[in-house]
Amino acid sequence: MNIGDLLGLLDSAVQQVFLLATLAVAAIGLAFGDRSVRIGVGLVLANFVLSGLVDHWVWFTIRAPVAVLDGALFGLLAVLALRSRRWWAHAAAAFALLGFFAHFIALVDQSIWWRAYVGLRWIFSAAVVGTLLVGVAETPLARGYERWAAQQG
């Protein structure tokens, strides 16, 4: 099995690009991020995989199991943000909350176009992944600040 076989399982080029970008950010986060980035990457990857497993279950107009997983992702990222002094973790939790709310928008207004609902969720998912990348970029700055603060006493 090669990457072409895996990409063939996805429906569109957009899904393929999003998957590859998510995996690239995850690899960068695991390689260069600090502990909080690695935890965030683990949470996002777990949500990504589990959501893919239950994405076909639909209740009314929403994907209820995905909504539950997105709510859990928000809760866990919120805990990470509260325990971490890193600002990007707060942004990741905020974007995850917006993604969670997108499910309720589709539930309240069932006339909403299905692609708009899914697209909105994807935008917020991409924002969460983007904040992880920002967390990786900010890691050396945070480490430098912590060293400086320790020297100041």
Image (spheres, helix red, strand yellow):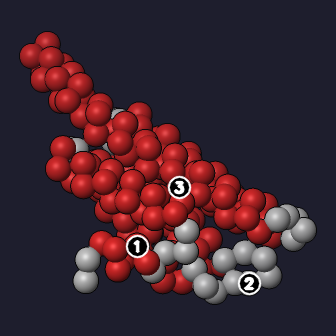
Label 2's element? loop
Residue 101 quadrant = bottom right
Residue 78: give x, y in percent of width and height: 47, 51
Residue designated by label 2: 59
Q: Residue at x 28, y 39 (%)?
A: 136
Q: Earlier in the sequence, mark 1 or mark 3?
A: 1
Residue 50 visible to an observer of this rendering: no
Label 3's element? helix
Residue 129 visible to an observer of this rendering: yes
Label 1's element? helix
Residue 80: give x, y in percent of width and height: 38, 51
Q: Residue at x 17, y 50 (%)?
A: 31
Residue designated by label 1: 7
Whole-number angstrom distance, CA of label 1 to CA of label 3: 19 Å
Between 54 and 152, the one nearer to me in the picture: 54
Which label lies toward us, 1 or 3? 1
Residue 90: give x, y in percent of width and height: 47, 41
Q: Is residue 77 above or below residue 16?
A: above
Q: Earlier in the sequence, mark 2 or mark 3?
A: 2
Q: Specify the farthest residue to the left.
A: 151
Q: Residue at x 56, y 48 (%)?
A: 95
- How packed mark 1 is, by other alpha carbons closer than 10 Å (few <14, some 14-19, many 20 or more), is some
Residue 110 quadrant = bottom right
Whole-number angstrom distance, CA of label 2 to CA of label 3: 21 Å
Q: Is residue 73 above or below residue 1?
A: above
Residue 74: give x, y in percent of width and height: 52, 58
Residue designated by label 3: 125
Question: Is 100 positioned to the left or the right of 144 in the image?
Answer: right
What amino acid type is highlighted by mark number 1? Leu
Which label lies toward us, 1 or 2? 1
